[in-house]
Image: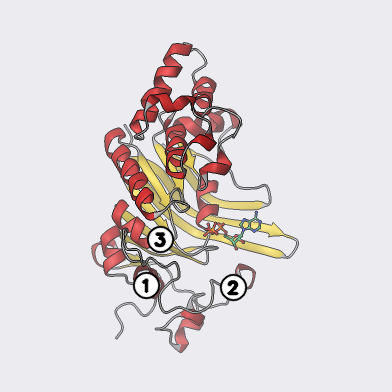
Amino acid sequence: MTARLLEIEDLSVTYRTGEGDVPAVRGVSLTVDRGEIVGVAGESGCGKSTLASTVLRLQPPSAEVSGAVRVLGDDVMTMRWGDLRTLRWAGASIVFQGALHSLNPVHRVGRQIAEPIELHEPDLAEGEVTRRVGDLLEQVGLPAARAAAYPHQLSGGQRQRVMIAMALACKPDLVIADEPTTALDVMVQSQVLDVLSGLVAELGVGMLFISHDLSVLADLCDRIAVMYAGRVVELGAADEVFTRPLHPYAAALSAAFPRIGDPAARYAPAGLGGDPPDLRLLPDGCPFTPRCPRAVEECSHAEPPLATYDAGRQAACIRVGQA
Ligand SMILES: Nc1ncnc2c1ncn2[C@@H]1O[C@H](COP(=O)(O)OP(=O)(O)OP(=O)(O)O)[C@@H](O)[C@H]1O
């Protein structure tokens, strides 16, 4: 079995729009190994969803892509359509935010979980498919009998569990989760996160987990990449990034979000005014400069590269290590 499930190498994704080019992802490199959960953090608009969808070549046609994405060693960008179809679900699958909108309201949830199984394993007997659906529901902590329910008969947390069961239906090696718990209340969110981390340990899959909430990632992940304006600005072991952030943006995210269970959870980075920059008008220097509490004049000269520090930690900031 290959240990390296996902390898993203110098990936850039630019949306061509009537109002100009939007460089949503800029030179991102990231890996996920078997049994590993890698988190991607950042505010809205930092490029997290674009990264997630491009990994399975689900980006819209207006997006121009350069760089490489390899899943289980196969290059996703140059792969033939037939191979890509097999890869989606069976090699790697995605759990999106907002299960209510992703599930079809007129079909029972068991039917919806069965669909990808039947598509990828057409020779499987009907009884086998039903058994697999029941097993999947139990794996995510729901009784097998819930297969007969329609989406509106389930709570938000139960629907999100169904989405996870669907993502696991074809036994993928890699699961990409894009804000899968954001719409849920704090208690249910932590239950669903427990299910996800239990499954990674039990099934030995790898996971790329996207969230704006660094505290969620700190609890769940082995490593965290923090994105700002389309780039990874910090990468390292999850607890290190959360408790001892190097980049001022990672520090603001980490101070903003109390750990799970704290009812005072807020959703704005601490001490930061303003918003992420308009990607069509990126400055020459570090794009975080206008919001950065540690910025000096030199920061606006050039965008700093991602440099490596102790214990393999990486950060893109000239102020790291300076008083
Ligand atoms: N189809 C598209 N066409 C043009 N621009 C887009 C498109 N999709 C996203 N963008 C832009 O790309 C940038 C990155 O968006 P993306 O959704 O990847 O960020 P995000 O960090 O996932 O934010 P969110 O959490 O809000 O989804 C944003 O500026 C967004 O407006």
State how far apart marks 2 and 1 are (Cα).
Answer: 19 Å
Q: Is residue 77 left or right of residue 8?
A: right
Residue for badge 3? 213
Mark 1 C-beta closer than 8 Å to ligand 1: no
Report the front residue among 68 and 152: 152
Residue 39, placed above or below residue 308:
above
First in sequence, mark 2 or 3: give its number. Answer: 3
Please name the amino acid that badge 2 sits on: Leu
Residue 261 circle label: none
**Where is residue 219 shown, x and y percent of the image?**
29, 55
Residue 72: % across, % down: 41, 36
The residue located at (48%, 41%) in the rendering is 94
Position above or below: 40 against 166: below
Q: Quadrant of the rendered structure where residue 314 is?
A: bottom left
Q: Earlier in the sequence, mark 2 or mark 1?
A: 1
- Quadrant location, the C terminus: bottom left
- Determine contact: label 1, label 3, CB under 8 Å: no
Mark 2 and mark 3: Cα distance apart in space: 25 Å
* Tag 2–tag 1 contact (CB < 8 Å): no
Name which residue type carries label 3.
Asp
Crowd class of label 2 (few under 14; some 14 to 19; many from 20; radius 10 Å): few
Q: In the rendered image, which quarter contains the N terminus?
A: top left
Which residue is denoted by mark 1 in the rendering? Answer: 247
Q: Determine the residue positioned at 40% across, 29% down.
A: 171
Q: Mark 1, residues whose alpha carbon is within 10 Å: few (<14), some, or many (≥20)?
A: many
Which type of secondary structure does the marked residue at label 3 adopt? loop
* Residue placed under numbered mark 2 in the picture: 282
Name the colour scheme: secondary structure
